[in-house]
């Protein structure tokens, strides 16, 4: 391995690190474990930062794909963001592939629904139904699709 080594994964347990290294070597990728002879004398884990699995820079992408498959996240790059992060806008429509994607304006949609509901129930003098209907409209608005394709109209 004359190329510079890059760390592609970190493991706390020695057994997991050796399993991953073996999988990469079975696929024909030379791998090196760093940290296996650390200051820790415990046989099955390292408390000095764990084990880092390193491969040549040119093999990193292929090795990462193999490890993702082993860990059950073969499509790790396509995992949706968490609720803590803002969702990045999709670049293409899931249905037709068009790049014409826009964010649905949920607040404007809720405001229009609330005004319409209020007008209808005021006309028939049902104040209690205004409250319940506006709450229901808010829930439906929150559950509504977030993105819309301008080309085919698909919402997701």
Image (spheres, rainbow, N blue to C red):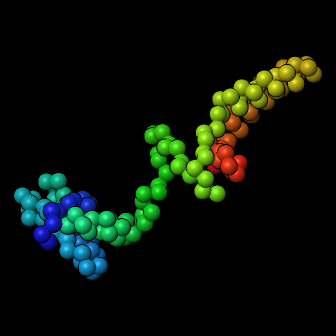
Q: Residue 49, how many percent across, how many down?
A: 17, 53
Q: Quadrant of residue 57?
A: bottom left
Number of numbered discs on residues: 0
* Drawn side of residue 131 relative to residue 23, left or right: right
Q: Is residue 94 left or right of residue 54?
A: right
* In the foreground, 95 or 114: 95
Q: Residue at 45% across / 40% down in the picture?
A: 85
Residue in the picture at 25% in, 79% down: 28
Q: In percent of the image, x 16 and y 59: which residue is there?
A: 46
**Residue 18 appears at what percent x and percent y?**
22, 71
Q: Is residue 83 above or below residue 123?
A: below
Q: Is there any visible trace of residue 106 in the rendered image?
A: yes
Furthest toward the right, the residue is: 124
**Image coords of residue 74 (percent x, y):** 43, 66
136 displayed left or right of 9: right
The image quadrant where one finds the N terminus is: bottom left
User: Which image quadrant is residue 26 in?
Assistant: bottom left
Q: From the viewer's side, name the closer residue of 109 and 90.
A: 90
In this orientation, does residue 128 appear? Answer: no
Direction left: furthest residue: 39
Q: Residue at x 71, y 26 (%)?
A: 111
Q: Is residue 126 left or right of residue 142?
A: right
Residue 73 x, y percent position in the rendering: 42, 63
Foreground residue among 20 and 131: 20
């Amino acid at each position: 391995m004359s190329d510079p080594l890059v760390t592609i994964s970190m493991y706390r347990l020695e057994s997991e690190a050796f399993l991953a290294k073996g999988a990469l070597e079975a696929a024909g990728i030379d791998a090196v474990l760093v940290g296996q002879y650390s200051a820790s004398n415990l046989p099955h884990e390292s408390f000095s930062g764990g084990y880092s699995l390193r491969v040549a820079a040119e093999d990193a992408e292929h090795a990462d794909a193999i490890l993702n498959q082993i860990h059950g996240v073969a499509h790790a790059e396509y995992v949706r963001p968490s609720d803590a992060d803002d969702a990045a806008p999709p670049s293409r429509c899931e249905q037709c592939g068009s790049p014409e994607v826009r964010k649905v304006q949920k607040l404007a949609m809720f405001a229009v629904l609330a005004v319409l509901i209020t007008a209808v129930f005021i006309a028939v003098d049902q104040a209690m139904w205004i409250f319940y209907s506006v709450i229901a409209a808010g829930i439906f608005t929150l559950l509504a699709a977030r993105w819309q394709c301008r080309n085919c109209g698909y919402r997701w």
